[in-house]
Amino acid sequence: MSRKTKPRSIYVLLFITVLLADSAFSQRNNSRIDSLLKAVYTIGVFNGNALVVHKGKVIYRNSFGYADGSKTKLLDQAMLFDIGSISKEFNGVGILVLQQQGKLSLDDKLSRYIKGLPAWSDSIQLKQLINYTSGLPATAANSDTQILAELKNLPRLAAAPGKIYIYSYSNVFLQRQIIETLSGMSYAAFTGKYLLKPAGMKNSVVDLPVTSATMAKAFDNNFKETAYAQGMTGWLRTSVDDLYQWLLQLDNFKIISKTSMKALAINFADGESSLGDVRFEEDKLIWHQHHGSNYNYEALITDDVKNETVIVLVTNSQQFKVNAVTKAITSIIKNEEYIVPKKSLYLDLREKVLDDFNKGMAFYRDVKTNQQDRYDLSFEIGDIINTGKYIMRRQRYDDAISLFMLGTTLPIAATDFSYAYQLTAECYQKKGYREMAILYLQKALEKDAANANAKAMLNELLK
């Protein structure tokens, strides 16, 4: 007795049905994503380029707003942007490329490759450079020459290597110096040959002047163009399409192996890795997200591998809302409700506080009383803490302490309490008040005993 089979026409019909359903899904999401991005552009929280890929297919791409502060040129998808800290993925991956070539080991000491540094260079391993636990202090230097001079005259590290996460450009600078030393090439040439070309990033350029005709020009909320004052070299200018190609190749282990990527993805405590936030589950990469900002440029790349979704957002008018916009796009793809992001409290508050602390705080109180429909207060503690950190970096330690203490009056988690106390301790340490720094580090650990940075800082002060 023969087995009956379905006619070929049925399979063709099923295939066409799937294609039509997929097309309808893409069109529906394209329309909803477009409505979202038009809304956030109108509100004033996104001026930039967007690319959304789902299941390997581009379901949305568009440009919103202007390419300069004069409003004479509109953005287009070919425009290049500075991507801030995302650039550090390239020097980090470059170090792992050299390891795969057998030219270094992450266990090697810094002193093996960079000569002329003080004795502390013999205590730092390369793996600590790439996860920012080298102990090198944050630097105010603003050029390669200044950073190198600062390092040569640095008497001691801020902490023992491997104990504290410190986001310092000195780590980035040294990684790039090692790449040049071992490759015999300029950092830009090495990046072009071993990273950009293999990734298919045809339009990206290291250190392209921001005045170039292909660059989007950054500007503030008043459309005043931002002076680019970054003197350190090695920063990538790239487009949304090239960033997508980078994620596609890197996250499929075409640039470096899975083992190398896991090494590069290691983060310490509350710090981020060289790749931002990368997660593996049962030996499979499931998530890669990285945020960067620099002189009013801002970018967020997200590869939600588990849900087969890639979102790339770049802007030349930083609003600190690319994360919220990404979450809303993700909700649309999942057919969930989403929230249209509001304006950033932090972005306006930090400038007002920097200009006049009392007037800035009056603005903050007015927002809480009268402008909650316009400003996003969903992460108020983050806005307050980040404002404190912003003016702390500008040596306004007393005002920063006031903001950190204000943060502790909000309904917050123990970890937020701990972080606010840790930052307060750092301010007191900068002011030379050792006992007050110790007191607040102890308070930080009372709130969160797992605060590794506070623990290490306290141990250093008690020596």
Image (cartoon, grey):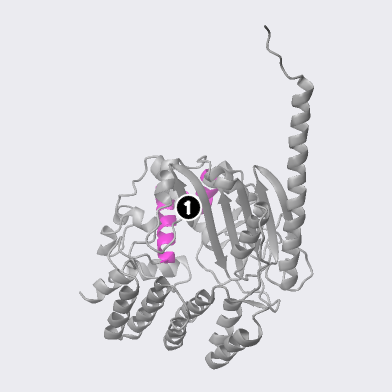
200 in relation to 239, above or below: above
Which amino acid, by three-letter code, is at mark 1?
Val
User: Which residue, as the protein is rendered here, is positioned at the far top?
Assistant: 1
Say whether residue 97 is magenta: no
Q: Position of residue 146 (x, y in %)?
A: 43, 70
Between 260 and 183, the residue placed more toward the observer is 260
Q: What segment is highlighted magenta in the picture? A: 167-194
Q: Nearer the viewer, residue 158 or 450?
A: 450
Most common SS among magenta residues: helix
Q: Residue at x 59, y 69 (%)?
A: 320
Give SS at disc 1: strand
Reply above or below: 428 against 130: below
Side of 289 where 49 appears, left or right: right
The percent position of residue 134, horizontal first and vertical second, equals: 34, 62
The percent position of residue 251, horizontal first and vertical second, equals 53, 45
Q: Which residue is mark 1?
A: 278
* As drawn, 327 above or below 386: above
Residue 67 image offset from top left, x and y in percent:
73, 66
Whether residue 220 sits left or right of residue 236 in the image: it is right
In the shown orientation, is residue 318 left or right of residue 193? right
In the rendered view, tell whether residue 436 sits above or below residue 183.
Answer: below
Which of 255 and 14 lies nearest the eye of the viewer?
14
